Amino acid sequence: MVKNFDINEQKYSIRCKYYCGKDPHSVTDIVIATYGFGGNKDNSATEKFAERLISKYKHFGVVVFDWPAHGADSLNRFLPDECVIYFDLAVNYARKEMNAQNLYAYGTSLGGYITLRYLTEYGNPFRKIALRCPAINLYDIMMADITPDEQTKLDRGKEIVRGYTRKIRLTSEFFDQLRAADVRKREYFDFADDMLILQGTKDAFIPFDTVREFAEDNVIELIRMENADHPFSDPGIMDLAISKIIDFFHPEQ
């Protein structure tokens, strides 16, 4: 079953998508799944993961939502701090309104970065956390793409535009928030036993060694995905990654 719903809390209206089996009342465990910059809740990677998970374990459901200024979201601005708020509202909704007994997190790219921020800013409500190509160097990635003309616009308080299916407006505040919240400078020892990172060796945006160093510094298990690019575009590699994440969430007894 696939259902769209909104979370209307505080001043926000968060567009969400829920995957579960034929009997939603049997769901006890919910995965909060998040994706990368410029994507949306209808992305095929999350759909494939959700279908594989719920076909194997009927007590699992998957919730994915549109980031601010992404997909069908009503906001025009995009700020990392508001992404963390959206994440928290989705977590609280899953616990209180969907009666989840256990929560899990599956964050990809930007979603991995926001998940890491959430852990240090709000605490850890998750039994297990899986991160695929987490954008731990997100500030560096975004800054590397700025032209001199765009930097001048930002310095003057104007916007620049990024995005794919939907154009996303970025201001200097966006970059200021990224710079102020560098997850590489935070510690994750308290969460490490329940975390798994999968990183591709051919990721053009997030160098494998950058992620390896982060994982080693925080004693987090890292799976090296040979020849995987940033989106894990090879179907075989993606299938392998999904299998490893599902096994991590629900190890066979």
Image (cartoon, grey):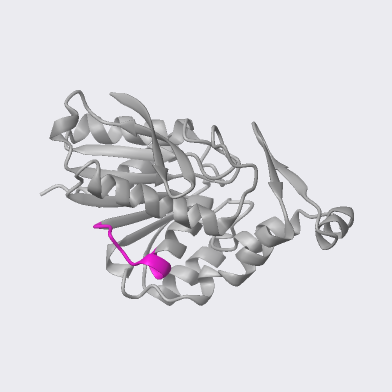
Give residue 65's quadrant in the image.
top left
Q: Identify the residue at image location x=59%, y=42%.
A: 75
Q: Which residues are magenta?
A: 119-127
Residue 80 visible here: yes
Nearer-the-camera pick, 251 or 91 = 91
Please tell me how many numbered marks the rendered image carries: 0
Compared across the picture, whether 135 is left or right of 157 comes to: left
On screen, 220 above or below 235? below
- Please state the horizontal and vertical placement of residue 97, each as a whole percent of the image: 25, 42
- Please state the horizontal and vertical placement of residue 178, each as a whole percent of the image: 61, 64
- Please state the horizontal and vertical placement of residue 122, each as a whole percent of the image: 37, 66
Nearer-the-camera pick, 182 or 144 = 182
Query: Is residue 186 on the magenta stretch?
Result: no
Compared across the picture, whether 148 is left or right of 66 comes to: right
Q: Quadrant of the N terminus?
A: top left
Extreme residue in the left direction:
253
